[in-house]
Amino acid sequence: MTKDTKNNKNKKPKFNMYWIYGGAIVLFIVVQVLGGTGFDETNPTTPSEFMTYLKDGDVDKVEIVNRREAKVYLTPEAEAKDVHKKSKPTSLLPTATKLPNYRFEFGDLQNFEDDIANVIQTENLNPKPQIEYKTEQNAWGDFLIGLLPFVLLIGVWIFIMKRMSGGAGGGAGSQIFNIGKSRAKLFDENTDVKTSFKDVAGLEGAKEEVQEIVDFLKNPEKYTNLGGKIPKGALLVGPPGTGKTLLAKAVAGEAKVPFFSLSGSDFVEMFVGVGASRVRDLFKQAKEKSPAIIFIDEIDAIGRARGKNNMSGSNDERENTLNQLLTEMDGFGTNTNVIVLAATNRADVLDKALMRAGRFDRQIFVDLPDVRERKEIFEVHLRPLKKAEDLDLDFLSKQTPGFSGADIANVCNEAALIAARNGKKAVDKQDFLDAVDRIVGGLEKKNKIITPGEKKAVAFHEAGHATVSWMLEHAAPLVKVTIVPRGRSLGAAWYLPEERLIVRPEQMLDEMCAALGGRAAEKVIFNQISTGALSDLEKVTKQARAMVTVYGLSDKVGNLTYYDSSGQNEYGFTKPYSEKTSELIDNEISRIIEEQYQRAINLLEENKDKLTELADVLLEKEVIFKDNLEKIFGKRSFDGPIIAGEEE
Ligand code: ADP
């Protein structure tokens, strides 16, 4: 039976039920309205008229309702009289009981009873009219109150029914009955995915690996014939914005096999057990459609290393989800042809069990692009732009060290926006440079209020950085210095750092010295220091601490490290070293920094005149480039050809 016919079958009786309920309610109301005692059309009369009827012996029975109202029933003979012709009760519905002929309100009950007794006595009526007492309630109020629970029940029932049937259409998925279903989005041959490998620039190694995965799924025999096993999964690891998701999208676009895409956080819900059930459902769906690819973005949301001591003592939902994922990936059926791709920028925190061979067999590193790759990424993102003819891509890619693919995409877009704002016909080099500045430093704040004194301090601070880094062999070559406030900073010196895979202590020390050059310049020139060096100090302190505790570069502390690459350190509350060592570490950090500060001061004292000259140029021009520095200092002796590299 197909799903549709099932639905129809379900729908019919449901529809009928509504009618039955509706009909019952309508009938109830009609009976109440038309047949209810409060709504019969009894003729009104007055107490005095009633007394005459009583005297005449026409009254058979008086019903006193709620001690307030009297209903009068006439004798059959009296009903035949002319005066009472009109009093014959009429009702729209036939009723078994006799209806009253008259009704009226008497004031005080006691008086009324006395009056009746009087009349009976004086007139000596026989038979005596009966007097009955009755309490009647407000029929409508009772009716509505009685109905309320039914209305509520039916309302809740309809609500639940609606939610259930909404889920059948594969809707938003917030339905309570679908909570354990996987939230993966499916791309298959019917879905139009426009991304292809052509859109992924650079990343040759990574591209090759994922292309191979696509190939595994398309021609598994090619590999299995030789006895090889198809890998279960591949983990894309790299900093944010380097194109991991893009790569996965390209796989979806090119694989021509069903592609399930979801994010690690899609497994998480506030209910216990949902994550695991979603994992099961996801793999079940994928196996049904195999060969298939499952892509889990940001897998660290669930793949984080399982803790040893669960502090809360509760059942950890995330661990259950991860366990289920491990089980599914390791499952018995090897040849199900489901490959799991996952992306993360925190491979260090992932559980080791997840990374072992047999699960994510392959780790594909997607690194920040180098200068050549940046050029290719620029090419991809410049395609849709109207650019100036003389745009130099090499120059642009050199100016953007440390930029990720996402940053470059952003630069291209910003440049186009800046050009449009300035009413240009094409996007030119200056727009790109402005865009880079903006992305690195934030929005220019030309109208930020700075006193001339502050401006001078900023100029000397930045000139200090520039001077020291110019003088030191291993400090990164300078690109530009600016004292235009941007974002939260008041000025900046930009460098083009070398690409280094291993760093030697003297290189680190030179960099620290240059970073301290700003504060040193303030000290040398004004003999005062300021809070402006906060970010420099932060950087330097971190670097010094890393030298001592991570890289083992301090003689006194020795060749040891307190770094734990597994990311599973549970040091939280206890340090892995003694109090004595901790004192030693502090002393070493402080010694390293103070030495470099002193070195910067000495350098600046020696070159005070050049520093002042540079600061003056800076105050005048606000932005200066390498050329201006060369004019003041002469060529930098140790500058080889610049290999563009990473940003600091
Ligand atoms: P992440 O690695 O964080 O998943 P994304 O894949 O989401 O990064 O990349 C974000 C955007 O950056 C992409 O949509 C794309 O525009 C751009 N981008 C990143 N890397 C590249 C690349 N190698 N080639 C072209 N564009 C890229």
Image: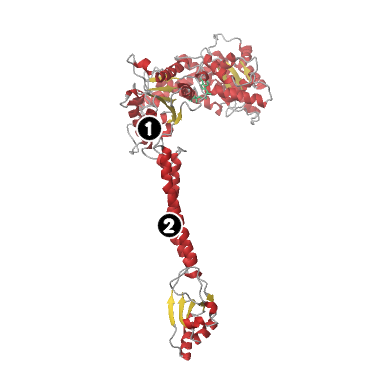
Query: Residue 637: x percent and y percent?
Result: 56, 8
Question: Dot 1 corresponds to which residue?
Answer: 279
Q: Earlier in the sequence, mark 2 or mark 1?
A: 2
Task: Determine the secondary structure under disc 1.
Answer: helix
Q: Are marks 2 and 1 in contact (CB under 8 Å)?
A: no
Task: Determine the secondary structure under disc 2.
Answer: helix
Looking at the image, is 91 positioned above or below residue 471?
Answer: below
Looking at the image, is 437 positioned above or below residue 132?
Answer: above
The amino acid pointed to by label 1 is Val
The amino acid pointed to by label 2 is Pro
Question: Position of 555 compared to 529: left or right?
Answer: left
Query: Residue 302: x percent and y percent?
Result: 39, 31
Residue 486 visible in the current orientation: yes
Q: CA distance from mark 2 to mark 1?
A: 41 Å
Question: Dot 2 corresponds to which residue?
Answer: 149
Query: Residue 19: x percent and y percent?
Result: 45, 53
Query: Residue 505: x percent and y percent?
Result: 45, 15
Looking at the image, is 41 positioned above or below residue 401?
Answer: below
Direction left: furthest residue: 332
- Judging depth in this view, the residue of 315 and 496 nearest the camera is 315
Labelled disc at residue 510? none
Direction front: furthest residue: 80
Looking at the image, is 272 positioned above or below residue 491?
Answer: below
Taking the spot 44% from the left edge, 44% from the top edge, the residue there is 163
Q: Quadrant of the N terminus?
A: top left
How packed mark 1 is, by other alpha carbons closer than 10 Å (few <14, some 14-19, many 20 or more), is many
Question: Position of 123 compared to 350: left or right?
Answer: right
- Judging depth in this view, the residue of 59 and 393 nearest the camera is 59
- Judging depth in this view, the residue of 233 and 7 nearest the camera is 7
